[in-house]
Amino acid sequence: MSKKEDIIGLYEKFVMHTYAQSLVLVKGKGTKVWDSEGKVYLDFMAGISVCNVGHCHPHVVDVIRNQAGTLVHVSNIFFNENQAKLAEKLSGMALHGKVFFCNSGAEANEGLIKLARLWGHDKGKYQVITMKNSFHGRTLATAAATGQDKIQKGFEPMPDGFSLYAEYNNLDSVAALITDKTVAVLVEAVQGEGGVIPATNEFMKGLRKLCDDKDLLMLCDEVQCGMGRTGHWCAFQASGVEPDAFSLAKSLGNGYPIGAIVSNKKLADVFQPGKHASTFGGTPLACAAALATLDVIQMEGLVTKARRAGDLFKEGLESFVEKYEHVKEVRGKGLMLGMVLDQPAKPLVEKLTDMGLLTLTAGDNVVRFLPPLNVSDNELEEALDILNDCLAEMHGIQIQEEEQVEAAPAAE
Ligand SMILES: *Cc1c(COP(=O)(O)O)cnc(C)c1O
C-alpha cells in the first residue's frame, strides 16, 4: 500500500477535505524532499517555515530518538528538565520574562489573548486590536483576531473582544480603534499569509510608544517570522523595540509540534495555577526537539546565515522585476521573501512544483519563499534557474529566446 492512487483514495474516503493537496511526499533530507514516484524537489517552503534547520537534521533526529526511548510525556503536574532548560533559552532570546508551553500557533496566540485579558481584567479592559490581512490561527478566537474575511466566513458569529481591523503600517489607523476597553495590540512583524509584508520600523516603534502611552500591551505573533527566519531571532528585533509578549510555534521544534508564549517580566506572573493549561504543552520529547533545533541554529550560525542568504536570494529575485513585466516587486526579510505578481500566483506556484521547486502563495498574487535557513548558495542558484525558466515560459517563448544567454538550460 504505497501507490500514490491508493493513498489518495484513502484520503478521499476518510480524511476531511480541508486542504488542496497535490503530491504524496515520502522522504526529506536537508532542503530536499522526495515524492512517492521518486522525484526530488527543492523545498522552498519547509513545511511553511517549520523545518528551519532542514528536513531530518542529524542532530535533531538523534536527540528525538534518544528522548523517545527515555521519556516521552509526563503531565505538567510534574517538573521536567527539558522544559526548564528550553524556557531559560527562550527567555534569553528576548524579553527575559517567563514562558508557557503549548502545541501550535493558534494555541499560542489564544494564550497571548487570554494572558492580555487576565492582565486587563480588573481595569475592565479586554479588547485586542489586530491588523487587516493578518493571520493568527483557526480557533474561533484566533480566527476572530485574523483580519481576513475568508477565514471567518461561515463560522459567524465570531467571538467578541476584537476591534475591527487596523491598517497595517498605519499608526493613525491603530490609534483610531483604541477605546477604554482596549487591552492590547497584536501584530506580526512580517505578515506571512497576508502577503509577506514587513512592518516598517517606524510602525513598530510607533506601536510601542502608543501602547506605553495608552497602557496597552504590545503582543507579537512570531509563529511564522520568528526563530531566525528573518535574520533576527525574533522579527520584531529588527525595529529595536520589544513587545510585552510574543508567540512561537511552527519552527520551534523543526517539525515536532510545540508552541510557546514568551513574556517580559511585567507579565511573567499573570498566569497563576489553574488559570491556563495544556496536557501536551512542553513534554520532555517536544522540548528536546526544540532544544536540539535551537542548538543547530546556534552551532551553524543560521540567524546570520538567513540574513546573508536572504540578501543573495532577494538580489536574484529582484533581477526578475526588471526582466519580466508580470513581476512587480520583491519584499520580505531574510529568508522570508515574497515575489509580487500582477496576477494570481497559484498557476506559477503549480508550474514551479512541476519543475521541482516547492513554494507557496501568500495572499492572492504573491509567490512566497521560506527555504530552510541552512540552504546552500548552490540551491539558491538552482531555485533561481527554475524560476527563471518558469517566468520565461509564463511570458511567452519570445522572451525565453531573448534571455537564453542568462537562462539556465531547460531541465528536460
Ligand atoms: C501558521 C500561523 C499561525 C497558526 O499556527 P498553527 O500552528 O497552524 O495553529 C498563527 N500565526 C501565524 C503568523 C502563522 O503563520
Image: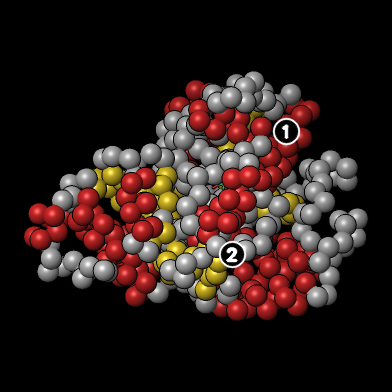
Would you name the residue on which mark 1 appears?
A: 117
Residue 40 vertical placement versus 122 (above, below): below
Who's the residue at 56% across and 52% down the image?
8
Which disc is residue 2 wearing? Answer: 2
Label 1: how many Cα within 10 Å (few below 14, some 14–19, many 20+): many
Amino acid marked by disc 1 = Arg
Which disc is residue 346 wearing? Answer: none
- Residue 408 placement (x, y as % from top left): 21, 69
Residue 231 versus residue 345: which sits nearer the camera? 345
- Residue 378 placement (x, y as % from top left): 34, 75
Image check: 20 left or right of 116? left
Q: The N terminus is located in which quarter?
A: bottom right
Who's the residue at 67% across and 57% down the image?
257
- Residue 38 placement (x, y as % from top left): 47, 70
Q: Earlier in the sequence, mark 1 or mark 2?
A: 2
Residue extending furthest right? 77
Q: Secondary structure at mark 1?
A: helix
> Does ligand 1 reach within 8 Å of label 2's beta carbon?
no
Image check: 62 left or right of 404? right
